Amino acid sequence: MYGLALCGICRRPRVADKSFATSTCPYCNASEKTKDLIFYFESPDQDIVRQALSQATGFVPPDMVQKKRRIEEADPYSTMVYQYEHCSDLDEKLTILAEGLTRINGSFTLDDIREIVGDKAEKYVSAMLDRCIAAEVRIGVYKA
């Protein structure tokens, strides 16, 4: 069992292994009895305790910052196509296309669907209309 505790000397948060009789602070090198430490988070998984320590100290991994920035700056069209290609449920695919194209363009046409799905575009639009996923607002123009 691992725990998150404050050092009795320097008062910095640290991870301690509760199976040992003593624990040494990695910051000030002070050694304390494990039973005397006050643990404010415990888990059998050391990685979970390390994540809790990261959150407690406000640490944000650099790769998470880059990932969030990449997601915020992503092209909405390519994101929609990616979601469509990695979805296995037909109804979900239809919804992704209809809502995505409506959000990006304001409306969509058969040609917009054809760019993504190819020869099956007519069947897709027909299915969207039948399932009330999209509506024809003008002749040949659809919205989700």
Image: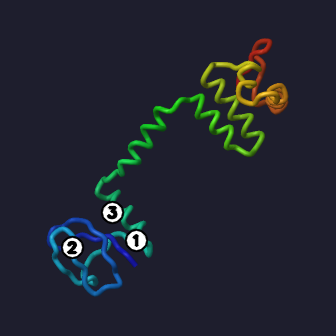
Q: How far apart are the alpha carbons under marks 2 and 3?
A: 14 Å
Q: Secondary structure at mark 2?
A: loop
Please tell me which of labels 3 and 1 falls first in the chain.
1
Q: Is residue 46 above or below residue 52?
A: below
Q: Is residue 119 above or below residue 89?
A: above
Please tell me which of labels 2 and 1 falls first in the chain.
2
Q: Dot 2, how many residues are within 10 Å of its Cα: few (below 14), some (14-19), or many (20+)?
A: many
Quadrant assignment, res 138: top right
Which residue bears the numbered disc 1? Answer: 46
User: Type of residue at label 3?
Assistant: Leu
Q: Residue at x 75, y 30 (%)?
A: 117
Q: Quadrant of the N terminus?
A: bottom left
Which residue bears the numbered disc 2? Answer: 25
**Left or right, 44 with reference to 7:** right
Q: How far apart are the alpha carbons under marks 2 and 1?
A: 16 Å
Q: Secondary structure at mark 1?
A: helix
Q: Is residue 86 above or below residue 46?
A: above
What colour scheme governs how the chains and residues are painted in the rendered image of this protein? rainbow
Q: Position of residue 75 (x, y in %)?
A: 53, 29
Q: Dot 1, how many residues are within 10 Å of its Cα: few (below 14), some (14-19), or many (20+)?
A: some
Q: Secondary structure at mark 3?
A: helix
Please tell me which of labels 2 and 3 falls first in the chain.
2
Q: Position of residue 108 (x, y in %)?
A: 70, 20
Q: How far apart are the alpha carbons under marks 3 and 1?
A: 11 Å
User: Type of residue at label 2?
Assistant: Cys
Q: Position of residue 61 (x, y in %)?
A: 36, 51
User: Type of residue at label 1?
Assistant: Gln
Q: Residue at x 78, y 15 (%)?
A: 140
Which residue bears the numbered disc 3? Answer: 53
**Left or right, 124 with reference to 72:** right
Q: Quadrant of the C terminus?
A: top right
